[in-house]
Amino acid sequence: MDSAKPEACLKERVSRQNAGNATHLTATQVGLVIIIALGFACIGLMTVLLTAVSGTRGSRGRALADGLLSWGTIGFVVGCPLACVVIWRVLGRIRDRYGLNQRTYSLLLFASWILIGTLGAFLAWGWAALLALHFAWGALVPLGMGLITHGLTRRVGVELHCARCGYAHDDELEVCPECGADWNGRGSLLEGRLERSRVMVSVGIAVLVLALVLTIRPLVVHVVSPLVPTRVLIAQVGSGATYSPDVWNELSSRSLTPEQEQRLADALLDRRLHVGSLDLASNAWLEQRVAKGQIRVESIERYFREMVELDLRGAAKARVGETIRIEALVENRTTPWSGVGVRIFFAGFSVDGEPVPGTRMEQRASVYVFDEWSVKRKPGAELPAVEVQATRPGVIAVEAEAWLIFAPEAALGWGRAWDEDGRPIIPPGVLWTESVKLRHEIVVE
Ligand SMILES: [Zn+2]
């Protein structure tokens, strides 16, 4: 080798080697590929394990074996790392061609890996796997891996160093005096001095541990919940936010005393009031207790009264000459597709005792007609309302009347709501009937 050869020329050779290493991978890159492959294998194993233990019927061992040997799982574990390596190469090319900085490149790389993982899991196991895995947390895995790798392989400066042992390059020498590597070989020299970052590695490890804990949380809950006393599980159901389907599955597998059933019913009612509606499973349990009268009358009353709460909404103050709009709307806590349905027989608005013509609903109405959230999603639809003209100072009383009819959906039917005398046509088989009178006052100045 010509010793007068300028360092710049050598550097160019090195960076050309590193950029275009389509055939040669450094040890770091091979290591990273192994880590990626292991990562995906872990995610695959965890998903299959979760799916197997959360299955309610059949042998778990069989479900586990079937899951592991499915095309979806094999495709995920093999296909995703391959896709990651391909995108890694492609992004490397883009970086070299357009001069992306290292940080942008790393972020793009991690983002694309997360995308591949999410997409791969979806293709392999469908929606269920994504939900079971809490995949949002899984996104922390590549981030942690990236921090660790970067912390371990970080290079500082522009001087060339021996790729094998890190010895500083000497122009005069062709062979490394430290490890004997041939410095003329491809990839034998690397730019920058290796400077590991303990902080970056520690943060990376912490992120990985966090990702692991959050990802396997459902598994932990599954293992732990059988050990939790019934009393605590019932309290957890009532508390709202901390409730998970595992808690419900565990509770419904135990045989409860009548007293415990009563407490659970009240906890579910509290929960419904708190979060808006119950899921199908817990709602079905409650429905059954209500239908058979197995819980206290007060709780049965609460079940119906709090399911649909009709109310009037509008301005409470106005000036003479103004028009005020008063709407009838519900707080809807029904569970869609549940056994018990509801119809609203809306008798109409009255202003200062005078019925407003045309505001009575002739047909039995669905609760969704009065549900703001549902109405907003229908183009042109609006809540039942009345427009009130403020003609003189004083108080205007807007009133509305309705019947709420609860029954199994099949018994409720649609069609006319009122008979010739203006009485509600209540079908047979009704579980609960509630007459509602509402009043809203507007003070006109
Ligand atoms: Zn060396």
Image (cartoon, rainbow, N blue to C red):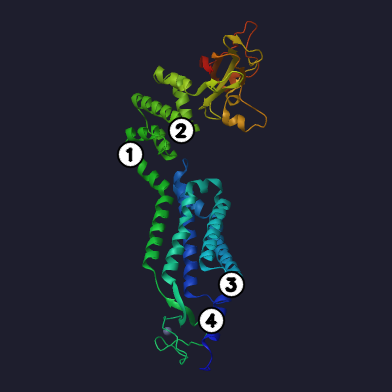
Q: Which mark is residue 228?
A: 1
Label 3 packing within 10 angstroms: few (<14), some (14-19), many (20+): some
Is label 2's Cβ within 8 Å of ligand 1?
no
Callout 2 amino acid? Val
- Which residue position is annotated with label 4? 14
Residue 182 location in percent, x, y?
A: 48, 88
Q: Which amino acid does label 3 sit on?
A: Asp
Reading the image, the residue beneath label 2 is: 275
Camera-nearest label, 3 or 2: 3
Mark 3 or mark 1: which comes first in sequence?
3
Amino acid at dot 1: Val
Quadrant location of the C terminus in the rendered image: top right
Q: Which of marks 3 and 4 is nearer the N terminus?
A: 4
Instruction: Give the amino acid at mark 4.
Output: Val
Q: Residue at x 45, y 51 (%)?
A: 49
Q: Is mark 1 on a helix, strand or loop?
A: loop
Residue 227, placed above or below residue 372: below
Mark 4 falls on what kind of element?
helix
Q: Quadrant of residue 421?
A: top right
Residue 105: image x %, image y %?
54, 65
Q: Residue at x 52, y 93 (%)?
A: 4
Image-quadrant location for residue 175: bottom left
- Residue at image mark 3: 96
**Do the residues bearing badges 3 and 4 touch, measured as CB atoms within 8 Å?**
no
Q: Do the residues labelled 2 and 4 touch (CB within 8 Å)?
A: no
Q: Is residue 26 visible?
A: yes
Q: Is residue 182 above or below residue 37?
A: below
Which residue is at a point 54% across and 68% down the rendered structure image?
A: 101
Q: Which of 275 and 298 is in front in this view?
A: 275
Query: How far, Cα to Cα, is label 3 from label 4?
Result: 14 Å
